[in-house]
Image (cartoon, rainbow, N blue to C red):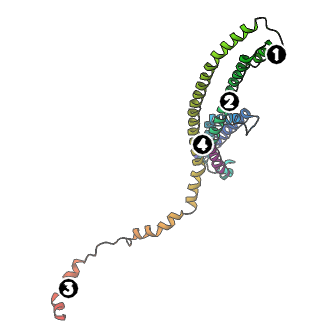
């Protein structure tokens, strides 16, 4: 009796501890991903990181629920929701598998957006350089300088340095900075792509591992219960063969003539009859 009470108490504690971990995980993820923006790649990247980052907490909670049923299959209220929990585990596994291509595509989109923003700044710098190079008046020079990234808005102010000196100095700096900036952009894009591919591969492996674990948690007990309720189709097909093998009817042994038959037979009788 003491063992039964201990098993029930253990199962009760495990089920509530598992529920607590799952609730903590769900609330933490939901608070971190608000507001929801399914069509924004940056939000999808953040969502994938949050889901996978705390996935071990949810998996531990589900494992505690399974252990609770192991100690006491009739523990309440968990025993009433076994089928629903198994179906939910299968759904989570499918969503985790779907997360693999989603996080990769979203990561590539974010990487392209960042590269596009940097390239836009470079294009703006090149456009300003062209305008400054063809400027033939102070007003045109001021308009070209206003196009430089980070430059203040032009209010038609005057420049105190002679026009030719300002134009020469600015063009010299721009012609030196633009190739350096282009090289830097190419390097940054390469490093980001390499880092992104490493991160996406890591997240894909983690997603697949979590998916397999949740699928197994949702399937194992179903298979055991099915095997207890009724035999599998394969077992039904093989059962007659197994019975025949146990009876010895399924084997073809060499025919052996008992020695007493040979001793009791009379060769002379057979000769006379022939």
- Element type at mark 2: helix
Judge whether 228 appears above or below 6 on screen: below
Pointer 2: what residue?
Answer: 116
Tell me the magenta residue range. Answer: 84-98
Structural distance between the alpha carbons of marks 3 and 1? 131 Å
Query: Is residue 170 something one can see in this rendering?
Result: yes
Residue located 60% across and 25% down the image: 188
- Element type at mark 3: loop
Query: Is residue 8 something one can see in this rendering?
Result: no
Pointer 4: what residue?
Answer: 63
Pointer 1: what residue?
Answer: 154
For label 2, the crowd category at 10 Å Cα-Cα, with few meaning under 14, some 14 to 19 and many 20 or more, is few
Q: Nearer the viewer, mark 4 or mark 3?
A: 4
Residue 178 in the image: state x and y as whole percent: 64, 19
**Residue 95 colored in magenta in the image:** yes
Residue located 49% across and 67% down the image: 237
Pointer 3: what residue?
Answer: 265
Contact between labelled residues 3 and 4, with CB atoms less than 8 Å apart: no
The mark that comes first in sequence, 2 or 3, is 2
Residue 4 in the image: state x and y as whole percent: 60, 47
Structural distance between the alpha carbons of marks 4 and 2? 45 Å
Judge whether 241 appears above or below 164 on screen: below
């Amino acid at each position: 009796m003491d063992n039964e009470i201990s098993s029930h108490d253990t199962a009760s504690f495990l089920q509530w501890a598992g529920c607590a971990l799952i609730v903590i995980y769900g609330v933490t993820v939901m608070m971190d991903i608000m507001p929801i923006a399914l069509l924004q790649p940056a939000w999808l990247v953040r969502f994938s990181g949050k889901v996978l980052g705390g996935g071990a907490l949810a998996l531990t909670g589900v494992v505690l629920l399974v252990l609770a049923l192991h100690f006491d299959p009739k523990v309440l209220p968990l025993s009433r929701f076994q089928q629903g929990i198994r179906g939910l585990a299968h759904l989570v596994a499918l969503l985790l598998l779907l997360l693999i291509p989603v996080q990769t595509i979203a990561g590539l989109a974010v990487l392209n957006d960042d590269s596009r923003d940097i390239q836009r700044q470079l294009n703006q710098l090149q456009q300003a350089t062209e305008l400054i190079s063809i400027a033939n008046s102070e007003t045109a020079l001021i308009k070209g300088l206003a196009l430089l990234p980070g430059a203040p808005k032009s209010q038609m102010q005057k420049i105190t340095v002679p026009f030719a000196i300002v134009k020469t100095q600015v063009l010299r700096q721009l012609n030196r900075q633009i190739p350096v900036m282009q090289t830097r952009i190419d390097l940054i894009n390469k490093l980001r792509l390499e880092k992104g591919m490493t991160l996406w591969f890591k997240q894909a492996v983690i997603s697949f591992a979590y998916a397999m674990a949740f699928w197994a948690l949702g399937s194992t007990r179903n298979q055991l219960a099915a095997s207890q309720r009724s035999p599998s189709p394969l077992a039904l097909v093989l059962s007659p063969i197994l019975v025949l093998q146990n009876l010895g009817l399924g084997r073809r042994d060499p025919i052996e003539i008992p020695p007493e038959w040979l001793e009791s037979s009379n060769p002379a009788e057979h000769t006379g009859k022939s």
